Structures are given as structure tokens and as C-alpha cells.
Amino acid sequence: MDLATQKKWDKAAPTFDLMAGKGAEERWEPFKRELFSTMQGNVLFLALGTGLDIPFFPTGQTIQAIDISPAMLEQARDRVANYDGEINVSVMDVHNLDFEDNSFDQIFTSCTFCSVPDPVNGLKSLKRVLKPGGELLMFEHTGSRYYPFKLMMDLMTLVSRRIGPDMNRPTVDNVRAAGFDITEVNHIFLDVVKTIRATKPVT
Amino acid sequence: MDQRIYFVVGDVLVNVAIALLVALVSYWLVSTNWNMLFAMWLMMFVGMVLAMLFALPAGILFGAMEVMLPMKLSGMLSGMVVGMWAAMQPITLAQAIGAGGTTGLISIVLVWFLNTRIRGIQAMVKY
């Protein structure tokens, strides 16, 4: 378990909903609902956080949800309980997933790989537990290739990574580097906020 | 750009507000005995830092990246324009406010154009 990352997010948990709960979530709601509406089969959700995404999940699903921060999951407890379906929650590090190989039909992430310390290895770990032909569906913010936004995000990352996420991650490249086949990248705001769909190759 | 009026109004308000604030700081700080290029770069940096600070409370209401990046652009451009102008010649408070407000509006419109250009036909999102 990456204790430094766990401690960082445990510390952020009490104020997380205040900072991310209204503006960002309302703004991103239509896009998240659309992405999550494709949930089917055996689903892994990473990282659940305080459960802000749960209201956007389609009802009636059985979802395995993990997060590295127990404090975040404690904040998520009411949202998990109120979900019209089943969410099984565990504290787990994406780098050390306690699941069998080829376990899941789909894996969803939501603003996750801005914070995973070793993103390519984290994605390889997801690939291990995803069934061949299974889908990785991500809602992520990444760096930008456009100036001056690229410069701004590189500078912001020097500060932001101490208390929360990196702002300049090349997540699409990381997904490809982890061995997934990318099927769709849908830009939501500039080339910064996006949904990514990828599959685990069958062979 | 977002099609919901709450976010459209929010985008305009926060960008004009931060550009005005940076314009006022530039007006009070910079004088004609400053080097023009130094004033421009310094106030661009000050504008970006101020925008980063004010983007946190604005973000609670209006979004994350959609607020932070345009606000930083507005702060930076306002600092550049008003800082450079105030170093070149004495300017009035009304001129600083006018330039700041206009810069904030231009910045958010530029971001909307760029966003539409990048997203292309994908902008036809069903709400």
C-alpha cells in the first residue's frame, strides 16, 4: 500500500465535497452519466472517493469499488447505502489489486489517473484484472498540448501534486503505453477534460 | 462552451472579475518609471497567481478546469495589457477598468472558440 498517497487523500477527505461537489460535478454530470450508462456485467470502479459519482451510476448494477483512502470511503458511506443496486467497497491500491486475472468486464475511472503515482503500472494492473476484450472507460483531466495552457498546467502541478492531483498527465499516452487499444477519446473541455474508451486486446 | 445559462453567466462573471482585479492591481502598482517589458512580464505572473488563488472559491460554484484555465488566461492577459500600458503612459482608473473588463471578456470568448475548435462536432452533447 502506498501510504504517502493514502495519507494525502485521507487529509483531503473532509473538504473534498466542498471543493469538488457542486461546480465540477454539476458541470460534468451529463458526460459522466453518458459514460456510466454503459455499465454492464462485472464492473470495477476506481477510485470511488467520497462517492460523488454514485448518483450518476445506472441503477441495478453490482459494482466493485475501490479507493486507497479509508477516510474518503467513510465519507462515501451514505451514498453507497442509498444506491439502488449493490456497491462493494474496499480499500485497495491500484498498483496491488487483490483480484484474480481477467475478473472484470468493464473498469471505470473518474478523475483517478491524475493522482496515481505510477500511472502506466497502475493501468497495467487494471489490464491484468480486465477480461480480454473488456473495456476501460475513463473520465479524466489531463495536461494540454496548447500554449499557454500547457505552461500553466506544468506550473500548477508543482504545487497541486503536494496536496492533490497532477494537472499535466499524458493519460491517453499512458493508456496506450499500458497496452490497451484506444477506441475513442472525447474532448469535453479543451483537450484537458475528456472521456477515454479503450479495450484490452484479446490476444 | 457550456450550453447551460448558469455556467455561461458564471464563466463571464469570474473572468471579467479576475481581469478587473488584476487591472486594478496593475494600475495601483505600475508607474511610468517602470521598464515596460519588466512591467508586462511581472504583471502577467501576478495575474496568473491571483487567478489561481481566486479560481479555488470560484471553482466551488462553477467548475474545475473550466474555471481555472480561463481565469488564469484572463489574469495573465489583463496584467500584460494594463501593466504594459501603465508603464508606457499615465492611465486613469476608468481606462484600467475598461481595459481589464474587455480583456476578461476577450479571454473567455477565445477559450470558447478554442474549445469549439478542439471538440468539433462532439460539442453536440445531449443534456
Image: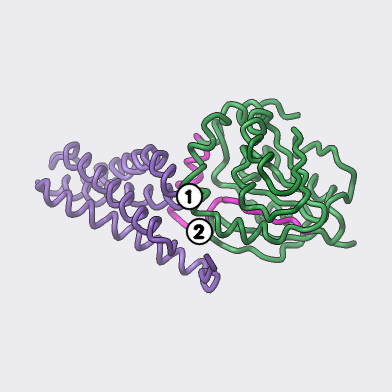
Start-end of magenta stretch:
A135-159
In the image, is residue A161 part of the stretch drawn in magenta?
no
Would residue A107 be found to the left or right of residue A69 on screen? right
Q: Quadrant of the C terminus of chain A?
A: bottom right
Would residue A118 be found to the left or right of residue A53 on screen? right
Give the label on residue A127, or none: none
Residue B125 visible from this viewpoint? yes
Q: How far apart are marks 2 and 1 (CA)?
A: 8 Å
The image shows residue A124, relative to residue A73, as above or below, that is below
Residue B1 visible from this viewpoint? no
Q: Find residue A73 and report its horizontal and vertical position in percent.
A: 67, 33
Q: Which amino acid does label 2 sit on?
A: Phe
- At a point 64% along the width and 44% down the height, the residue shown is A112
The chain assigned the colour purple in the figure is B
Q: What element carries label 1?
A: helix
Q: Find residue A182 and report its horizontal and vertical position in percent.
A: 72, 62
Foreground residue among A183 and B57: B57
List the residue tagged with mark 2: A189
List the residue tagged with mark 1: B65
Q: Which colour scheme is used?
A: by chain
Foreground residue among A147 and A98: A98
